[in-house]
């Protein structure tokens, strides 16, 4: 399956009338992620204005009193708040955003929410909207955090930030596509993490945490493409036996005083596979 990734923009590519020289960027949300990105942008030569009602602007960033004030005169607005605040931040910031500005939403929100933000920006006459997913933790990386971008202005976003050191992969597609890719990956990574946490909690209660910790580390170290096929095919082929095994595991966790949330969810998924197999 094609990744839909467009050709990368070479660092130093001229952008618009003045390239990236004197790029004016507003950063809405100066917490751990937004603060690090704003700091790196200022260090790279961008003129950065920021707004956060709870966090002061870092050195080199001009603090402002509102989203609209921060967005005023900016070429690019980076919304780095939270999914629950993204729409309010957009509506507030649009009061100051110029018709030629670009709005980039870096919040972890659903694809549908990103599409709604894109529609609101389009109705307001903002030059472009881009859905940006941060694909790694920001601390220690800042502006160099790998980003995935989609939407009407995704390529322009990459052209603006790559010369300043950002790592941006552009997906050919609508707003929401980058969010979809990140959240699909999150189903795996966060689900895996939750399963490991539950397993180690149970092992701790049983007095063998170090043994299980080493076993998990060994399995992850040996994993390859064949491991993925084995996990998927084995779940379907051995669903009956594994369902019974997970029932027993859930009973054991109850006896150990550990809520079997992931264990029961895994059992329920196997039951679903069985029902699909039996369906006409």
Image (cartoon, grey):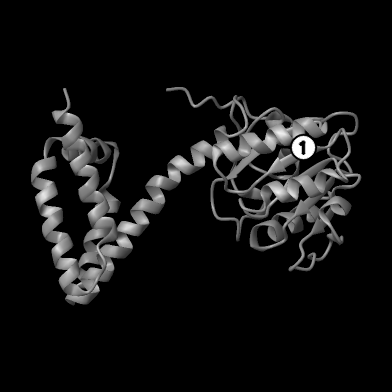
Q: Does 88 sit left or right of 2 as displayed?
A: right
Whether residue 218 can be seen here: no
Residue at the image point whose x is 78% and y is 65% from the top: 58
Q: Secondary structure at mark 1?
A: helix
Residue 93 in sight in this render: yes
- Image coordinates of residue 75 in percent, x first then y, are 85, 40
In the rendered image, residue 14, in percent from the top left (x then y), is placed at: 82, 30
Q: Is residue 7 above or below residue 86?
A: above
Please rate how many residues cluster around mark 1, counting C-alpha atoms within 10 Å: few if below 14, some from 14 to 19, many from 20.
Answer: many
Instruction: Report the front residue among 211 and 263.
Output: 263
Q: Position of residue 12 (x, y in %)?
A: 77, 34
Query: Of residues 166 and 234, which is closer to you in this image?
Result: 234
Number of marks drawn: 1
Based on the displayed image, in which of its 4 quarters is residue 262 positioned? bottom left
The residue under the point 56% across, 32% down is: 177
Residue 143 to residue 203: above or below: above
| Quadrant of the image occupied by residue 170 | top right
Residue drawn at (50%, 37%), measured in percent from left and top? 181
- Closest to the observer: 173 or 263? 263
Quadrant, the C terminus: top left
Q: Name the residue beneath numbered marker 1.
A: 160
């Amino acid at each position: 399956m094609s990744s839909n990734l467009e050709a990368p923009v070479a660092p130093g590519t001229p952008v618009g009338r003045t390239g990236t020289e004197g790029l004016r960027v507003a950063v809405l949300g100066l917490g751990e992620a937004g603060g690090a990105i704003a700091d790196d942008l200022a260090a790279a030569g961008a003129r950065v204005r920021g707004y956060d009602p709870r966090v002061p602007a870092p050195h080199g960033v001009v603090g402002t009193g509102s989203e609209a004030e921060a967005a005023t005169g900016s070429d690019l607005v980076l919304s780095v708040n939270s999914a629950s605040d993204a729409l309010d931040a957009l509506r507030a910031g649009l009061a100051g955003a110029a018709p030629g500005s670009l709005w980039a939403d870096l919040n972890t929100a659903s694809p549908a929410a990103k599409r709604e933000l894109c529609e609101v920006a389009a109705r307001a006459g903002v030059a472009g909207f881009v859905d940006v997913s941060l694909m790694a933790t920001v601390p220690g990386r800042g502006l160099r955090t790998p980003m995935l971008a989609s939407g009407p202005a995704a390529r322009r976003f990459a052209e603006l930030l790559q010369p300043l050191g950002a790592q941006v992969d552009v997906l050919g597609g609508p707003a929401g596509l980058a969010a979809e890719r990140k959240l699909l990956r999150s189903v795996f990574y966060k689900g895996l993490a939750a399963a490991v946490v539950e397993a180690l909690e149970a092992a701790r209660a049983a007095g063998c945490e170090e043994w299980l910790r080493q076993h998990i580390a060994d399995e992850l170290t040996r994993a390859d493409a064949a491991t993925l096929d084995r996990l998927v095919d084995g779940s379907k082929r051995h669903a009956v036996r594994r369902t019974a095994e997970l029932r027993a595991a859930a009973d054991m966790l109850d006896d150990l005083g550990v809520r079997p949330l992931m264990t029961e969810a895994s059992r329920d998924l196997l039951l679903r596979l069985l029902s699909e197999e039996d369906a006409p």
